[in-house]
Image (spheres, helix red, strand yellow):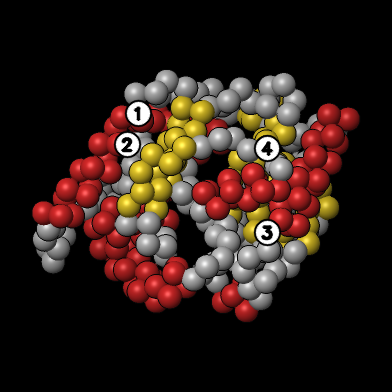
Amino acid sequence: MFYPDIEAAIARGAAHRKNMHELGARPGFRPLDLGHWLRLCAEAGVPAVPATLVASINPQLLTEFIEPHPDHVPTEAQLETLQAFWAKVQEARALHGYMLRWSCCACAKVKHRLSTGEPRWNPDFLEFFGADDFRAFDLLCEFYHPEVGAYLRPWLRYAVHEGYPVEYRAFVLNGEIQGVSNYYPQRDLPDNDETSRDVETVLAFTRRLIAAQREPINLPNAFVQAMPKLNCWTADFARLADGAIVFLEGGPPHLPGGAHMCCFKFGEIEGVALSNRNAEGDV
């Protein structure tokens, strides 16, 4: 596919990985890695949507082969590694009712369908998984760990409200919960007993994750690295059709870190936000 800034993105990613080589090799909890979250959920007793690691590979190998580059001549070993990786991914694409995602993100087709109110499973969730996905490409270029994984996940029956799954994002900074938001500012969640029970469960599960996560935080962020013993991250949860709350995925904190604020105003994470607080309505 055409990517307008591919050479700049590749160069930026290579420089980033070089600068972060020592950081990537350090022990610690990685909020950008789904595998780390699933292990933490198991330890903390927090139910999570299961995932199976299909295969893993060096992210630089992936990004350097998206489009031909005049200064890059692939070796036979590199080609064999890529072929073996994608062969395993191709086998996984045959499984109806599943989706594929990277350690660090889901691809654009998944995010687009959910953000436009299409929560049902779609074959696109398997077919359009790749490194050339415009959403995944940037994140893979800047993924500073030596290997990134392809994960297979079942598409469960999620509760839906006004066309969108019922999901929440918990914001954690310095080991404290800042707030909980309805994940989709595109539509409000009702302020009723069911939502209140959801929020209480999200808070309880988030507290369990904070208590269980005792490793240094491993993020490419100077502020977080300055306080490596403190939990700084976001955690996303969903309500299943039967009412159960499950962990979906986690990521960096809002500030610093870059996680989207969902229904909160930028930089103003506090309390519980069930509807969009952005005065301009910009989502």
Query: Label 4 is placed on what type of residue?
Result: Pro
Quadrant location, the N terminus: top left
Q: Which residue is mark 4?
A: 47
Q: What residue type is disc 1 on?
A: Arg
Identify the residue under disc 1: 93
Give the Cα separation between the discs numbered 2 and 1.
6 Å
For the residues marked 3 and 1, what is the alpha-carbon distance in whole angstroms? 33 Å
Q: Earlier in the sequence, mark 4 or mark 3?
A: 4
Point out residue 196 in the picture as x, y percentages from the top left corner: 86, 36
Choose mark 3 or mark 1, whichever is in front: 3
Crowdedness near tag 1: few (<14), some (14–19) or many (≥20) residues, C-alpha within 10 Å? many
Residues at marks 2 and 4, CA–CA distance in whole angstroms: 26 Å
Query: Badge 3: how crowded within 10 Å, few (<14), some, or many (20+)?
Result: many
Residue 216 at x, y percent in the picture: 62, 69
How many marks are shown on the rendered structure? Answer: 4
Counting residues from the start of the chain, the first of labels 1 and 4 encountered is: 4
Kindly report the distance in space between the C-alpha atoms of the residues bearing marks 2 and 3. Answer: 31 Å
Image coordinates of residue 149 in percent, x first then y, are 40, 48
Which residue is denoted by mark 2 in the rendering? 89
Q: Are marks 2 and 4 in contact (CB under 8 Å)?
A: no
Q: Residue at x 83, y 52 (%)?
A: 271
Instruction: Report how far apart the C-alphas of labels 4 and 3 lie in the structure.
Output: 16 Å
Residue mark closest to the camera, 1 vs 4: 4
User: Which label sits on residue 213?
Assistant: 3
Q: Are marks 2 and 1 in contact (CB under 8 Å)?
A: yes
Label 1 close to label 4 by CB (< 8 Å): no
Q: Earlier in the sequence, mark 2 or mark 3?
A: 2
Asked if 71 appears above or below 187 in the picture, the reply is below
Is 144 displayed left or right of 34 in the figure?
Answer: left
